[in-house]
């Protein structure tokens, strides 16, 4: 996580149901706590879409517990910092209705 998050740009994070975290130290501490807990669930991202605007980009996705229907929507914002994409904001929140996994689409006609 330390390599992913911006070092110069201001960062913020909103975990589902939690208060806004501002600053690199607070954000990294929250992820250390989450990852140290060794949860019984396996968080996966689905249906990611990236949007780039010069030196800024955002990625949207759905988050789910393994193969279960997705229960969260997430947005991650990145900036180019020293030639590398670094995250400056993560926001995840509950979906009003869980989203089932989509069937893969074929690349063959």
Image (cartoon, rainbow, N blue to C red):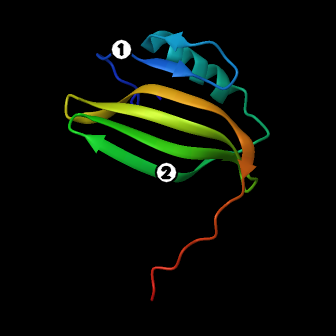
Sequence order check, earlier mark of 2 and 1:
1
SS assignment at label 2 = strand
Q: Is residue 88 left or right of residue 14?
A: left
Q: What residue is disc 1 on? A: 10
User: Where is residue 82 drawn, in percent x and y?
Assistant: 20, 28
Which residue is painted at 26% across and 35% down in the image?
Answer: 84
Labels in figure, total: 2
CA gap, disc 2 to disc 1? 24 Å
Q: Is residue 56 left or right of residue 89?
A: left
Front in this rendered view, residue 93 or 8: 93
Which residue occupies the extreme front position in the image?
96
Q: Is residue 108 left or right of residue 36?
A: left
Residue 35 appearing in the image: yes
Query: Looking at the rendering, which quadrant does residue 9 occupy?
Result: top left
Which residue is painted at 62% across and 24% down in the image?
Answer: 15
Which residue is painted at 28% across and 16% down in the image?
Answer: 8
Residue 67: mark in rendering = none
Q: Which class describes the residues within 10 Å of circle 2: few (<14), some (14-19), or many (20+)?
A: few
Q: Residue 60, relative to residue 56: is it above or below?
A: below
Q: Residue 9, relative to residue 79: is it above or below?
A: above
Front in this rendered view, residue 13 or 82: 13
Q: What residue is disc 2 on? A: 48
Residue 2 appearing in the image: no
Q: Residue 60, relative to residue 7: is it above or below?
A: below
Q: Is residue 96 left or right of residue 3?
A: right
User: Where is residue 83 drawn, in percent x and y?
Assistant: 20, 34
Where is the C terminus found, in terms of image quarters?
bottom left
Q: Residue 13, relative to residue 100: is it above or below?
A: above
User: Where is residue 74 drawn, in percent x and y?
Assistant: 56, 37
């Amino acid at each position: 996580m330390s390599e992913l998050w911006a070092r110069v740009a201001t960062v913020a994070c909103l975990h589902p149901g939690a208060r806004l975290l501002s600053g690199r130290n607070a954000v990294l501490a929250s992820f250390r706590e989450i990852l140290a807990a060794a949860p019984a669930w396996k968080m996966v991202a689905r249906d990611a879409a990236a949007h780039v605007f010069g030196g800024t980009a955002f990625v949207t996705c759905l988050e789910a517990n393994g193969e279960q229907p997705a229960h969260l929507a997430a947005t991650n914002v990145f900036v180019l910092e020293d030639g590398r994409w670094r995250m400056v904001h993560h926001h995840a929140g509950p979906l009003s209705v869980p989203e089932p996994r989509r069937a893969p689409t074929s690349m063959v006609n």
